[in-house]
Image: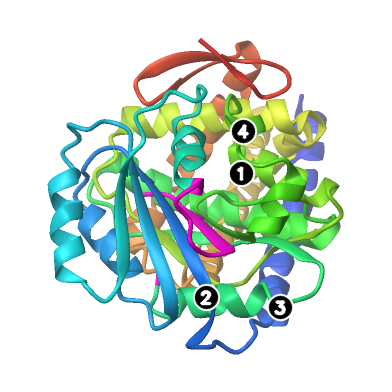
Amino acid sequence: MLYLSLLLVAAAWCYQLLALVSLGRFFRDRQMLPAATAGPGVTVFKPLKGLEPATRECLESFLTQDYQPYQVLFGVADPRSPVLPLLRELSRAFPRVETEIVICSGNLGLNPKISSLQQLEGRARFDLLVITDADIKVAPDFLSRVVAALQEPGLGLVSFPYRAGRGQTLGASLEALTIAADFIPSVATATAVEEIRFALGGAMALSREALRRSGGFAPLADYLADDYQLGRRVALSGLKVEILPYVVETCNPVMSLKDYLAHQLRWARTYRACRPRGYLAYGITHAWFYSLAAYLASGLACWGLGLLLATLGLRVTLGFFSERYCLGGELPWRTLALLPVKDFLAFGLWLLSFLGNRVTWGGRRYRVTPEGKLME
């Protein structure tokens, strides 16, 4: 047991160091093109469901862009949604921005986001399309950067890393820590070791032609990981897919612990369905758990405690470097202190992901097929 745990610790340390180097290279070496304040028109798709504490702030960030021309299409499935009064208010408050509220009441598949996007597509006036989640907040130069990036010949789709805004609950703090210490390092590592064939769903941008060549939104209607599928299909069409070093922000300050665990389990089972070999290899990343196992297997020896503390130091270094220097976030130290708890939960969720294929999404229960499709 001791030798096995030490072998796993060594593998986990190698991954953590690779992730640290990959993060630095990704955010240092990949340069964004200069922003432009005018150019081809852009249509922003904004599928919405409910009203959250940060919804106004997130939506306003898309109505204060320093780029023209662009339109924003708000898609709402429920005509009684509490977000509708806010959308009407924002449309009046920002008359210079072309906005439209679209009631997407049609049920065009099990993925509600893709169902709304199918119904919004026909309302798009422009050929450059931006797809963003309701809880994404961006800087005023976001659309300028998107348009500049999409001018590169052969580039079909771009997406963007994200940080979490300040959390007010334990679940939100754990989510922010997971993004900084696990998710973004894994994305940076992927960009260093493989050709990117997936997208990050918080914010994506592509041309109408790239969407057409990839098959459109309709084939994604029953997939859980629509961002992965869209990126993969654009890549298979012969166009490049890139993740740009421009950071956006996801805002969910009051996520409960239950919601955090459900979200992470859904993500884990989705990842396992989309990339089974990669997800199995992801098991070596759990450095804290393996170091704890080595400490216990050593009979609580001093060297085992030293290894455990060194691993914790490495994990904190990775999380802090990712959050502060790469993502430009401001996670407080008390949140970083939750890292051992988060890592312990992450290992448990990794194991639990192999014990079933059911997920909870939007208050409904689904089964995820081996292809990544949803079934009620």
- Magenta stretch? 121-138
Up the image or down, 363 lies above or below 140; here it is above
Q: Look at label 2 and name its amino acid.
A: Tyr
Which residue is under mark 3?
A: 30
Label 3 residue SS:
loop
The first of marks 1 and 2 along the sequence is: 1
The first of marks 3 and 2 along the sequence is: 3
Label 4 residue SS:
helix
Left or right position of 313 against 339: right
Label 2 residue SS:
helix
Q: Residue at x 70, y 25 (%)?
A: 273
Residue 328 percent location from the top left of the image: 45, 73
Which residue is under mark 1?
A: 227
Up the image or down, 376 lies above or below 86; here it is above
The first of marks 3 and 1 along the sequence is: 3
Reply yes or no: does residue 126 show up in magenta. Answer: yes
Relative depth, front residue between 182 and 192: 192
Mark 1 is surrounded, within 10 Å at the Cα level, by few (under 14), some (14 to 19) or many (20 or more) other residues, namely many
Q: CA distance from mark 1 to mark 2?
A: 26 Å
Q: Residue at x 47, y 88 (%)?
A: 37
Q: CA distance from mark 1 to mark 4?
A: 13 Å
Residue 180 percent location from the top left of the image: 51, 57
Label 3 or label 2, whichever lies nearer to me, is: 3
Label 1 residue SS:
helix
Which residue is under mark 4?
A: 218
Which residue is under mark 2?
A: 325
Q: Quadrant of residue 255?
A: top left
Left or right position of 113 against 271: left
Label 2 or label 4, whichever lies nearer to me, is: 4
The answer to whether residue 338 is visible is: no
